[in-house]
Amino acid sequence: MIERSPIMVTGGAGFIGSHACKALSDAGHLPVTLDDLSTGNRDAVKWGPLAVAGLQDTKAVAAALQAHGVRMVMHFAASAYVGESMRDPALYYLNNVGGMTSLLAACRAARVDKVILSSSCATYGIPDRMPITEDTPQQPVNPYGRTKLICEQMLQDYEAAYGIRHVALRYFNAAGADPEGELFECHDPETHLIPLALMAAAGQRGPLEVFGSDYATRDGSCERDYIHVSDLARGHLLAADYLETGGESCALNLGTGRGYTVLEVLAAIKQATGVAVPYRLSPRRAGDPPMLTADVSRAQRVLGFKAACPDLVQIIRDAAPSFGLNPVPEEADAQIPA
Ligand code: UDP
């Protein structure tokens, strides 16, 4: 039997982490999930062992790394709500910076020398030029973005001092769910546009509030770059291969390079599900940049990464079953009355 190379996935019971575990397993690796199950879902851990421990428990993390002979970590476990980070920054510094400090101490103890970090386009703040390249100045405008930037900076310092190589992957807006239906899109609490809009379409909640209709965009609503979660997972796999074959530390955007406004997302939901999303125009949400789209050329050059599913309608088709909606088959799209 061929031995599968073990890779620790912190937050492997969460939305993006569980999709990464599936991609790792499909590629012949053994994902070793570390998760405290505070927001993750035990049922999403299907492709390898689960160690239930908090990141702050350095000894438990080091023991899990050693027990499974891990040499590389993918680090997803973090608090990731911008609004919550404004209300309770202490939680974010504790979980994200404290968690990272403890994780890296465990890595050193267990001689793990490769780390892939879930970073975010929130580290860029509100850039004045689109699309965003990796050289766009990182000027985060909320505690969440600041903690992710600190994690990136820690990795640079730890490489210089301890030789830990890394790839920081700066995600744009993760969306969708496993096309094979083995995993679902779920966040608790739910704050993200596509799930909330699908819930509104399914009648599970009232009309969606469209936050802001007076931005300087095509239709006045905010524009974002939505990337399929399975594409994000594949980006991690490519980053793992890159580090495995001696690649230098770097930071890379993961997006599709294409932006959709909130109103365009609602139209895509109608197209993907046949159901119109009830909505009302509301005031702007504090801290929302008008537009965030990725320049994806560096990830393509360095990793050979290109989103396989950049089509928003397909991303929504894959997410729809998570909310009890049946996607309309592709060939039927054209027949849906506007
Ligand atoms: N949004 C909205 N109504 C909602 C939730 C989100 O209009 O109920 C907008 C939000 O203002 C942003 C976009 O949808 O422009 C994506 O927001 P989300 O919270 O999904 O991700 P973010 O871009 O904040 O990471």
Image: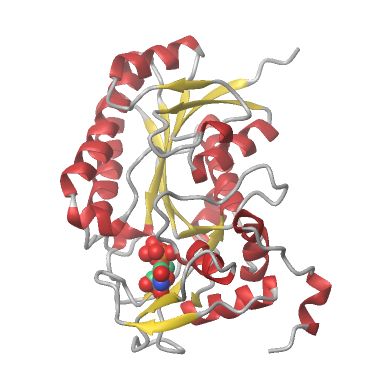
303 or 265, which lies in front? 265
Q: Position of residue 162 (x, y in %)?
A: 29, 24
How many labels sit on residues? Answer: 0
**Camera sees residue 133:** no
Q: Quadrant of residue 168?
A: top left
Q: Position of residue 61 (x, y in %)?
A: 37, 19
Q: Position of residue 285 (x, y in %)?
A: 29, 73
2 or 201, which lies in front? 201
Q: Is residue 252 left or right of residue 325?
A: left
4 or 135, which lies in front? 4
Q: Position of residue 288 (x, y in %)?
A: 30, 71
Q: Residue at x 46, y 72 (%)?
A: 206
Looking at this view, name the residue that lies furthest to the right.
331
Q: Quadrant of ligand 1?
A: bottom left
Residue 83 drawn above or below residue 38:
below
Residue 244 drawn above or below residue 293:
above
| Render colour scheme | secondary structure
Quadrant containing the N terminus is: top right
**Camera sees residue 162:** yes
Q: Residue at x 53, y 42 (%)?
A: 236
Q: Residue at x 62, y 44 (%)?
A: 183
Q: Residue at x 23, y 53 (%)?
A: 85
Quadrant containing the C terminus is: bottom right
Looking at this view, name the residue that lies furthest to the left.
90
Q: Is residue 178 left or right of residue 38?
A: right
